[in-house]
Image (cartoon, rainbow, N blue to C red):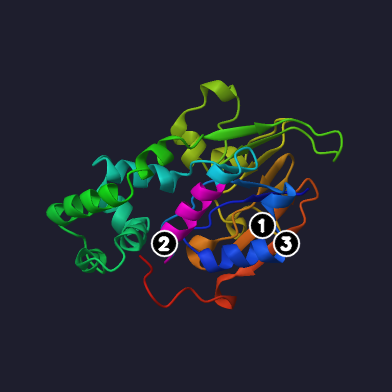
Amino acid sequence: MSTYFVSDIHGQNQAFQQALRNASFSPQRNDQLYVLGDMIDRGPESKEVLLDLLAMRDAYPGQVVLLKGNHEQMFEDWLLGRGNSENYLRFNGGDATIRSFLGNHPLRRAFIGSMPSEEAQDEARQFILSRYPQLLPALASLPLYVELPANPQTGAPAVLLVHAGIRPGIPLQQQSPEDLLWIREPFYLYYEGERPIVFGHTPVPKLPNYEGFGPWRRNNMIGIDGGAAYRRGVMLVEWPSLQSIFVPIHEVQSSPFVRM
């Protein structure tokens, strides 16, 4: 039985699946997988990543655990008609997710290259929600963090899993959702707590003094975002050894067709 962490897949399904194959990941053999958010957006197969992981979570509850990232929150907000749709669609890669869920629907063209009209967005929302009625409840069910207890058998310490990080000096139960989903420098520059924290959100090359291979480590912080959002790669990390499998995006090829 092995435990793996991954974060920020960002719709790069081929790289993600290759990482799982390279690790011989098998929930049937009681392997565990914790996904620290940002399963969607920017990449071409956001629908496949999200729906496949939700199906795996339902089939293996307790073994496959999915956390919410800021991109799942933005997608949920967009589906509900909340938030800043231009910020999501044009600047955070949400258009790729909408195209992924629209498949071959003619509306897909409205989400290529320019900001779609409000009418096109409303029609796309209605289509997606009618076709995938489980989507909103599934997104709402994603926790913002998970606390794993120590495991004397493997020597793993207790650890906090969270998408972006925490604000130092504030108890976990009082952390704001915005910080858990979005925080960067105030966390990874100043956290000095005793509890190990594994996080994504900030690609490891953008973290201080990254050495260029595997997870980023500083004190009790471990960053595992492989940079798939910027077409770098997907990183799968074994716990507690921190041995990693990294699959560069350029080494795999996304499906050349749109799957419905």
Label 3 sits on a secondary structure element that is loop
Identify the amino acid type marked 3. Ser
Determine if residue 159 is in view: yes
* Residue 81 on the magenta span: no
Overall secondary structure of the magenta section: helix
Identify the amino acid type marked 2. Arg
Seen from the viewer's position, the closer of residues 79 and 59 is 59
Provide the residue designation for mark 1.
236
Q: Residues within 10 Å of mark 1 (few under 14, many from 20)?
A: many
Mark 1 and mark 2 lie on one chain; the one further toward the N terminus is 2
Determine if residue 216 is in view: no
Mark 1 and mark 3 lie on one chain; the one further toward the N terminus is 3
Specify the quadrant that holds the C terminus: bottom left
Q: Say whether residue 155 is left or right of residue 53.
A: right
Examine the image and state in which quarter residue 251 appears: bottom right
Kindly report the distance in space between the C-alpha atoms of the residues bearing marks 3 and 2: 27 Å
State which region is magenta. 44-56
Establish if 209 lies above or below 80: below
Provide the residue designation for mark 2.
42
